[in-house]
Amino acid sequence: MGDKRTTFRQLHEEPGAFIIPNPWDIGTARILAALGFRALATTSAGMAFSYGVAEGQTSSEDTLNHCRALVSATPLPVSADLEKGFGDSPESSAQTIRAAADIGLAGCSLEDHTGNPNEPIYDFSLAVERIQAAAEARSALSHDFVLTARCENFMWGRPNLDDTIERLQAFEAAGADVLYAPGLKDLDTIRLVCESVSKPVNVVMGLPGTTFSVAELASVGVKRISVGSALARLAYGAVANAAREMVVSGTFEFAQQAMGFAEIEGFFTGVTKS
């Protein structure tokens, strides 16, 4: 376990950028591992969909059980999307880190989104205090753990780049290992964010709008690339479209696009490789 945690931090120290894809169950985790990815991240939205609820509606117990299952699914290090953590206070952030570490996660992200659509972003001071408490809890662990701090401005109707950068800089000073501001739309903005901090930066691809290649993102300073709920949305969308075809047309053409039974099983038996 210690090796996985150490390996995860080392990935952030290698040249270039790496992709950390987001499975939402054991099967998808094993497929991604078989295809050669070196680390995995959970997706809070994908997890919620797998429980049949909206994002943010899963309990802390269900979230930890889900993360525990993904940690056990493959030999790869796993970082968890834990949204705001299991409460609003700095102490709840610290408790979240300890709980995440206890189940074998190699890292996690905490965000400054409150979960309240009327006041979606924590006050600056509280947001920083939450990350500082999380960083202190991480430093007290007996093993490595990578803390990612997220600024959610661009995801919640607050596209204020100056405030976003100020928050990321404050999160870095508070002890975060990785900085992350989902929703940045262009390479110049991403470059500016990367140049404004000294710690590794994560970006998410797969949101609606323009996407960029690994090479393009690495060229502007990005270290880590996740895809959030994009893979889950792709899969659930395929199921929904197939169901609509059956209901509306009474046809089954969707099956022509389905992966073969043997190929899927190959991911789980070690036959299919990248």
Image: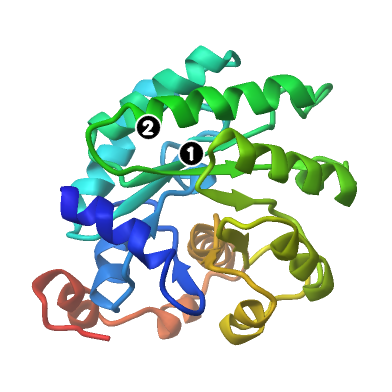
- Dividing the picture into quarters, in which one does residue 244 lie? bottom right
Using the image, determine if residue 41 lies above or below residue 109: below
Position of 76 compared to 14: left or right? left
Label annotation for residue 139: 2
Among the 4 quarters of the image, the one containing residue 10:
bottom left
Q: Position of residue 184 (x, y in %)?
A: 77, 60
Q: Dot 2, crowdedness within 10 Å: few (<14), some or many (≥20)?
A: some
Give the residue number, with chain letter if any, for mark 1: 48
Q: Would you call the spot at circle 1 few (<14 residues within 10 Å), some (14-19), or many (20 or more)? A: many
Residue shown at 81% from the left, 71% from the top = 186
Q: Mark 2 or mark 1: which is in front?
A: 2
Asked whether 50 or 175 is in front, the reply is: 175
Answer yes or no: is residue 115 visible: no
Secondary structure under the numbered disc 1 in the rendered image: helix
Q: CA distance from mark 2 to mark 1?
A: 30 Å
* Identity of the residue drawn at 32% across and 25% down: 99
Provide the secondary structure element on which disc 2 rests. Answer: helix
Figure coloring: rainbow
Of the numbered discs 2 and 1, the one sitting upstream in the chain is 1
Circle 2: residue type: Ser
In the image, is 191 to the left or to the right of 180?
right
